[in-house]
Image: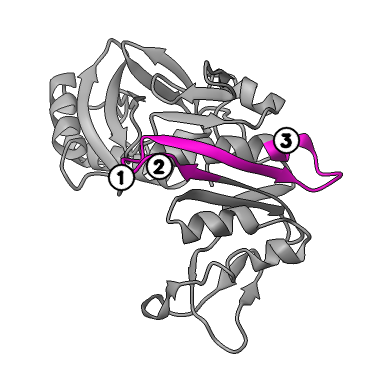
Amino acid sequence: MAIVWSRQEILAAARTWLLRADAVWDGYSGVDVIAEPNNLLVIFRWRRDPNVYAIEVEFPTTPASPWTGLPVTSADEWAVEVGARLAEELATGLVSRSRRRIRDGYVVLDAHDAPDVGPAGFRISSVPLVGMLSPSWPHRNGTHVTWGSPEALVSLPASKVGSWLAEAGMDVSLPRQLIIEARLACWLQAYVDNARGEPFVGHAAASWEDIQHTTARLDLVHIQPGVPSEVCGALVRSAVRTVTEDGALRVVTVIDVPELHGLGFRPANEGGLTLHTSGGAEPPSDPAAGS
């Protein structure tokens, strides 16, 4: 069945539903929806990321949801379904996992055939900084640490955070010190993708260089002996994406591993390496992964 709505109606509906203050997903802020010859271009900001992103949405040719494929009865209903699909994409790391290209000042995201956010057989996640202290702390359940009900969560003592990484033989003194100094920007962990979420095989940490949180420093990247280098690359990409989404305009480091050069880090005048995050920091062939 062919649709009976005009492209003008579709554009108007998309603007109504995708530019609302509460549209789509937490962290999404709609900028504009533009009609192009074959599709709509949905332009948005994501969290505190300095880039302006865009995603192409094909004009409908049948009255069906672009998310579920079920029938829809109006352009407005179709636009709501576009928002639902975009919400699911953002919730599953659209910005991190998509291939990307720069066009007209926008970072255009293309999630088709995008690589997995982590290397095969491994996963990347944030090291939990809050929990519920108890005599049997911590409880571990699969790949997650079970802390208790949300209202019981508290900031964990720095000496407790990442204890499982320390038990695996990794040095956690630097990120713990960054917690004490209130400068930790992110602390990520890598582990084997199995039912237990173990063993832990690497971690990475970054800190804030300034109180405005515009410059982040990649302080630590470590993988255990025998772990594939792809895990190091995933940790680096995830750390860069995390601080970028938190507003970093620049990432600096004295660490020099091949994975950093692949992301666009270049020698800095003051020594070390630097990356400017705006303008699509990662090359299209090597998108950053999310946690």
Give the residue number, with chain letter if any, for mark 1: 27
Residue located at (61% from left, 53% from top) = 174
178 or 230, nearer to the observer: 178
Identify the mark nearer the N-term, 1 or 3.
1
Q: Which mark is residue 96?
A: none
Q: Which residue type carries mark 1? A: Gly
The Cα atoms of the two marked residues, 1 and 2, are separated by 9 Å
Nearest the camera: 131 or 71? 131
Helix, strand or loop status at disc 2 = helix
> Residue 156: x, y in percent?
49, 71
Name above or below for residue 40 compared with residue 124. above
The quarter of the rendered structure image containing the N terminus is: top left
Type of amino acid under label 2: Leu
Secondary structure of the residue carrying numbered label 1: loop
Residue 225 belongs to magenta span: yes
For residue 208, what is the image quadrant?
Answer: top left
Bounds of the magenta span?
Answer: 206-232
User: Would you name the residue on which mark 3 appears?
Assistant: 230
In the image shown, does 89 or 242 lie closer to the viewer?
Answer: 242
Query: Relative to 231, is 111 above or below?
Result: above
Label number found at residue 90: 2
- Residue in the picture at 63% in, 52% down: 189
Judged from this view, the residue extending furthest toward the bottom is 135
Does dot 3 land on a helix, a strand or a loop?
helix
- Where is residue 31? Give x, y as percent: 21, 29
Tags 1 and 2 touching, CB below 8 Å: yes
Answer with mark 1 or mark 2, whichever residue precedes in sequence: 1
Residue at x-position 60% and y-position 66%: 144
Q: Position of residue 47 (x, y in %)?
A: 32, 41
Q: CA distance from mark 2 to mark 3?
A: 24 Å
